[in-house]
Image (spheres, grey):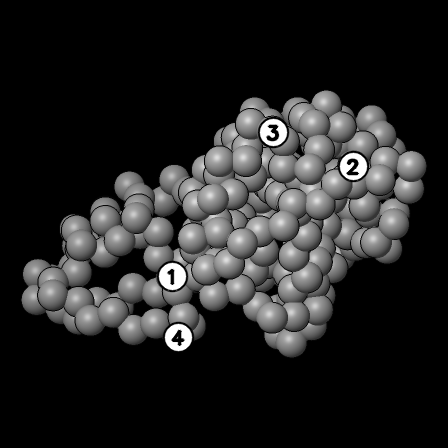
């Protein structure tokens, strides 16, 4: 998230012989590469089965068009009684544009992406946690490691390109024993990405039609 130069500078001051521990909420290829660069013969310790999803998170996949996605989010917020939600998109530009669109719809919204400074991200997150923001529109990079207590729901506005990111995204809700909802909006050109998610989850995904009259 932009901290690599700082990390490299800190490590340059440390003795070559040392004990180093690396902790990460996820173990993506990027984190694995980082670990291999700075750790010598490391031992990997995992506290959860890889790609496991919480049993208390309700997962739903809806077949929609790209043009309908924003309206569908508003509909599901209403029909499912979600007071707040984290909305995931695949690009920084998409996050900024979608946040502005939701603002025009009358929803209090903040964007969280890689072009935001750390101070801007912290302020947006604090406002969300305080209940001052309805929707937090985020990219995967900016949302790494977020811990939000009692987050009612997560939307996958875009189906992620990396199937493991799906598990990471929906893990933002249903934490500490609470229940949560993970709602994914699937356009026709995103269907292929579901096959990769199915392989990660180890089960077939049922994509539901959505009644737009609700």
Mark 1 vs 3, N-terminal side: 1
| Residue for point 38% across, 40% down | 2
In the displayed structure, does residue 23 sit left or right of residue 42?
right
Q: Which residue is mark 4?
A: 47
SS for callout 4:
loop
Q: Which mark is residue 188?
A: 3
Q: Which mark is residue 24?
A: 1
Gap between marks 1 and 4, in whole Å?
11 Å
| Residue for point 11% across, 65% down | 41
Mark 1 vs 4, N-terminal side: 1
| In the depicted structure, whether residue 192 falls above or below residue 195 | above
Mark 4 vs 3, N-terminal side: 4
State if disc 3 and disc 4 touch (CB < 8 Å). Answer: no
- In the rendered image, the quadrant that contains the C terminus is top right
Gap between marks 4 and 3, in whole Å?
36 Å
Do we see residue 127 in this rendering? no
Gap between marks 2 and 4, in whole Å?
36 Å
Q: Nearer the viewer, mark 4 or mark 3?
A: 3
Q: Which residue is mark 2?
A: 72
């Amino acid at each position: 998230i932009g901290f690599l130069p700082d990390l490299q500078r800190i490590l340059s001051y440390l003795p070559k012989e040392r004990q180093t521990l690396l902790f990460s909420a996820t173990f993506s290829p990027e984190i694995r590469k980082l670990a291999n660069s700075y750790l010598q013969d490391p031992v990997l310790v995992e506290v959860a089965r890889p790609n496991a999803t919480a049993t208390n998170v309700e997962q739903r996949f809806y077949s929609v068009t790209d043009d309908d996605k924003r309206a569908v989010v508003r509909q599901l917020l209403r029909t499912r009684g979600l007071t707040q939600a984290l909305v995931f998109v695949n690009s920084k530009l998409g996050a900024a544009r979608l946040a502005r669109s939701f603002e025009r719809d009358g929803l209090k919204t903040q964007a969280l992406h890689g072009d935001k400074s750390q101070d801007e991200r912290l302020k947006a997150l604090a406002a969300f946690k305080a209940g001052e923001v309805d929707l937090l529109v985020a990219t995967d990079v900016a949302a790494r490691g977020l811990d939000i207590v009692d987050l009612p729901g997560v939307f996958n506005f875009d189906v992620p390109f990396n199937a493991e990111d799906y598990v990471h995204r929906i893990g933002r809700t249903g934490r500490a024993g609470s229940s949560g909802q993970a709602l994914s909006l699937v356009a026709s050109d995103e269907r292929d990405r579901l096959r990769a998610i199915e392989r990660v989850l180890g089960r077939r995904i049922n994509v539901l039609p959505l009644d737009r009259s609700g």
